[in-house]
Amino acid sequence: MLMTMSWTWRNIVSLSFFKNPSGTRQERVREIQLGAHTVQSHGYEVAKFHRHDWIILLLLVVIEITLYVIHPFYRFVGKDMMDDLKYPLKDNTVPVWAVPMYAVLLPIAIFTTFYFHRRDVYDLHNSILGLLFSVLITGVITDAIKNAVGRPRPDFFWRCFPDGKDVYNELGNVICHGKASVIKEGHKSFPSGHTSWSFAGLGFLSLYLSGKIKAFDRRGHVAKLCILFLPLLAASLVGISRVDDYWHHWQDVFAGGILGLSVATFCYLQFFPPPYHTDGCRPYAYLRTLEELNGCEQPTNAVNTLNVHAVRVETVNQQVEQNNTEFMGLSRPNDSSMTLDELESGRRGREEMMLPLLNV
């Protein structure tokens, strides 16, 4: 009897640890199907879902153009302040037209490369939308502060007095006789637009790459960090060039870098988990759709679980009845100790054995 009971409990334990071997395969199939969502099949639906975001994006473009056109605050500039504003007037090492090339188009080209690899329209759409928001929000904040502060550039003297002859009014303020557009640009030193835009675009790209290559997976692959630092290094060099060209003070560059990188981080986290997250390589839209697929399968899984529990209870009942029969057959006829209380105790024992299984 003891051997039979031992065999019974081994079967119960094996049933309690029963797992569906096809679960992992089904999960993989779902991910493959979800990753096959292309621009042709689901691009319109994704863009329609974010239609309000695209409208806000267009509004930011209009605001940015307006801020660029209006005049900044013309701060008082006295003669004693000119000692720090007499640096030579030079051309830009990094032209203005080049900033959108490396801060916007280059990241989009990299996003597209990942799209052709994974066929995930959620990743492509949200990365582009997040990048554009990062750059435009940074641009609006930067130009708004530029116009409000009106700090003179380090080369302001030669912008105001191209012939080198400085003139001041009775209050000691400058009376510029240079070109109006050049003087206007000379009052937009703080913060650096080149630097803020560079860190907004390349900083977003660095966060994107850190999630895709799983740079923070705790495996100690320091080489991945080198890939992340490349965009940040490029943005830093752009900022340094602004000081070397005497278009900005170092404080302008520092503030622009902090501003651009901060906005890029906030915009990235709106669409993607943190890079150190387990699912950091996927956008939130992908994970949300995967959860919805799992939610649709929960009723079916619940029915399967009840069936498994029923099989367990039936197996326990059969084994206990068989053991009781064998025990009764081995008992002597003159043994009158098998009373009604003992039978009742055996029944309660069977109920206690089945209770944990029913509560699983």
Image (cartoon, rainbow, N blue to C red):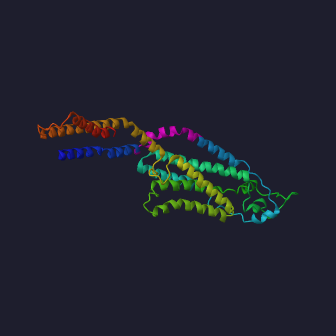
Q: Position of residue 239 (x, y in %)?
A: 62, 61
Residue 118 seen from this side: yes
What is the magenta range?
A: 35-55
Residue 204 position in % (x across, y down): 54, 53
Residue 21 visible: no
Taking the magenta stretch, the answer to whether it contains residue 47 is yes
> In the rendered image, which quarter is residue 247 located in?
bottom right
Q: Pick whichever, 290 or 320, lies toward us.
A: 320
- Count of numbered marks: 0
From the top left corner, tell me how far across and down residue 359 is, in percent: 34, 38
Main SS category, magenta section: helix
| Residue 317 shown left or right of residue 139 in the figure | left
Question: Is residue 271 part of the magenta span, yes or no?
Answer: no
Q: Quadrant of the N terminus?
A: top left
* Camera-nearest residue between 283 and 125: 283
Which of 249 and 241 lies nearest the eye of the viewer?
Answer: 249
Taking 124 as reference, is 58 left or right?
A: right
In the displayed image of the protein, which residue is found farthest to the right? 170
Where is 331 relative to 209, above or below? above
Q: Position of residue 360 (x, y in %)?
A: 33, 40
